[in-house]
Amino acid sequence: MVRSVLNTLLLTLVVSGSGSTFAGTHNKHVAKSKPPVRKEVEVVKDTDGVAEARLIEVYKLIGQAQNREALSKADALVTDFPHFQLAQLVHGDLLAARTRALKTFGDVPEDVARTASTTLGELREESARRVRALRERPQPGTIPSQFLALSQKSKHAIAVDASRSRLYLFENSAAGLSLVADYYISVGKAGTAKSAEGDQRTPLGVYYITSNLDPKSLKDFYGSGALPISYPNVLDAKRGKTGSGIWLHGTPPNQFSRPPQATDGCVVLANPDLQHVIRTVEVRTTPVVIAAKLDWVVPQSTRAISKPFEDALLGWRNAKTSGNLQQLLTYYTPDFNSNGKSLSQWMPTLKTELDQTQGRTIQLKDVSYLRWTDTNDTMVVTFGEVADGTRVGWTKRQYWIRQENQWKIFFEGVI
């Protein structure tokens, strides 16, 4: 029976629940035993998340020993997505199981297995990552720990968990962040923690989408489009990291998805999934957190972390309102940098800003702050700075670092 071969991979997924196991992959694509027929699902090549949901449904049927129905659904899946290699592999196993006992997942003839051992291994790992990410769902109402506060100007946010080969897409409303979709992704051939040009690693940190590249300007290799992100960010540059051209992009026309670690550092999605992300997110205001492994928390639990930083930000604002330059400078690190200017070189800019406000109360509008913790504890802060009585101000981004339990600014710049 094909069930005995795939049992190790699939049984936990199957017994953990029926449709609820897959809830959250996308609101439109909550997998159930017999999903309702919907017009948009009929145009499968233009619909995000459908291919994976259908593959998982095949897995589920295999785990329930419903091989005939599984084969029927696998037939339809590979017809609609002939370049979906993982689906083709499962389809082949189901066909082979009709005439012989299977020894392993992806049970191809020995000569084929020898020549395609790398590809088989990658497909097996892709399958395991997809199943694991859909089995180990984040708890409802939780968010990645980096998202401490997000302004309503950021209508969406993205978080990538490299350990699960997963990208999570959030909508930001007055009620806070809510998970609206998540997708299988590929990262760098050498893994994560990018530090140098050409190291084939995906960076870790807090970034923003900087542009939306026209697919007509791209080679077929990048698929249906590309969203560049702001690597290297200020913290990366401070640490001497090099490289550029890190994008969220699609796959070539003849390849539905890529192995979990297959890129030169970019984050790669299947083209239908990328198209949905491109249609949804906004350039410049959408943060992208890339982590080796995401830590999911209840939003209320971040208050203890947020309060000391909020106090520091308020203290900085009050110092600037007072016009006291010496007091204000206590909030900056000695190695402060603003687009190449040291603290002493940047001082005239700060003095000019104080002169322009003339002691009027500074208001901070649309404040966002995202936390990044590795060897240091940092905050990436974005806000509008407006003095009372004025109608316009600056949109600024600051990077703060915690040193001996005190928050200090090591970068400040106008966006």
Image (spheres, helix red, strand yellow):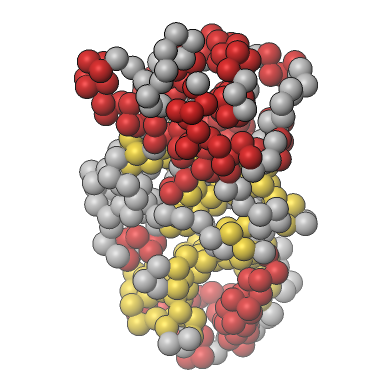
In terms of depth relative to the viewer, which is nearer, 161 or 248?
161
Q: Quadrant of residue 88?
A: top left
Give above or below for 39 relative to 248: above
At 40% across and 73% down in the image, what residue appears? Answer: 376
The image shows residue 303 at horizontal and vertical percentages of 66, 74
Give above or below for 338 relative to 188: below
Residue 152 appears in the figure: no
The image shows residue 132 at horizontal and vertical percentages of 51, 43
Q: Quadrant of residue 344?
A: bottom left
As drawn, is 361 to the left or to the right of 323?
A: right
At 76% across and 17% down in the image, what residue appears? Answer: 37
At 53% across and 31% down in the image, what residue appears? Answer: 274
As drawn, is 200 to the left or to the right of 253?
A: left
The image shows residue 345 at horizontal and vertical percentages of 34, 75
At 62% across and 27% down in the image, what residue appears? Answer: 64
Give above or below for 411 relative to 359: above
In terms of depth relative to the viewer, which is nearer, 111 or 336?
111
Residue 26 appears in the figure: yes
The image shows residue 18 at horizontal and vertical percentages of 70, 36
In terms of depth relative to the viewer, which is nearer, 110 or 115?
110
How many numbered tags mark residues here?
A: 0
